[in-house]
Amino acid sequence: MSKLLEPGYEGDSELTWALRSEFGKGFPIENLRPLLVSSNGQTQAAAVFIAVEMGSRLSYKLNCVVAEIADLLDSKASHLRFDAIEALLDAPRRPMPPFSAA
């Protein structure tokens, strides 16, 4: 995660997917916050991409960083705004209970 916070970070899809995997294994979602508020657009892009890719199983846990994601709606970069909208639309979803035929 520290590599994404380096001032000269220019994006790295392998690193982003590796970090996404760690969040899926239980790495605290709150750790997205410093990435989302970074002054580096590539770092913000990686963070909001991770948020979008969490899927319905984890997206409800994004509630702790909704404000930081919402702040990206003011970004000059359209891809950041688009991903922020997608993450915000998924954030309130709760995991569905398993189907049970009774």
Image (cartoon, helix red, strand yellow):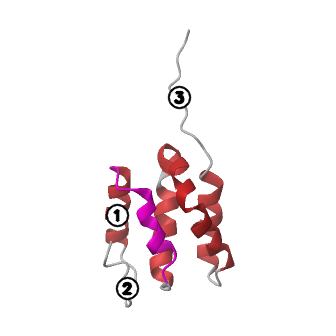
Give the distance between the C-alpha atoms of the residues marked 2 and 3, in whole angstroms.
40 Å
Return the residue at label 2: 9
Return the residue at label 3: 97
The type of residue carrying mark 2 is Tyr
Q: Quadrant of residue 81?
A: bottom right
Residue 95: x and y in percent read: 53, 38
Badges 1 and 3: C-beta atoms under 8 Å apart?
A: no
Residue 91: x and y in percent read: 59, 52
Name the residue: 53% across, 50% down: 59
Return the residue at label 1: 19
Instruction: Please tell me which of labels 2 and 1 falls first in the chain.
Output: 2
Q: Is residue 24 above or below residue 97?
A: below
Q: Is residue 55 above or below residue 5?
A: above
Helix, strand or loop for disc 3: loop
Name the residue: 55% across, 33% down: 96
Residue 21: x and y in percent read: 34, 56
Badges 2 and 3: C-beta atoms under 8 Å apart?
A: no
The magenta region covers 25-38
Residue 97: x and y in percent read: 53, 28
Helix, strand or loop for disc 1: helix
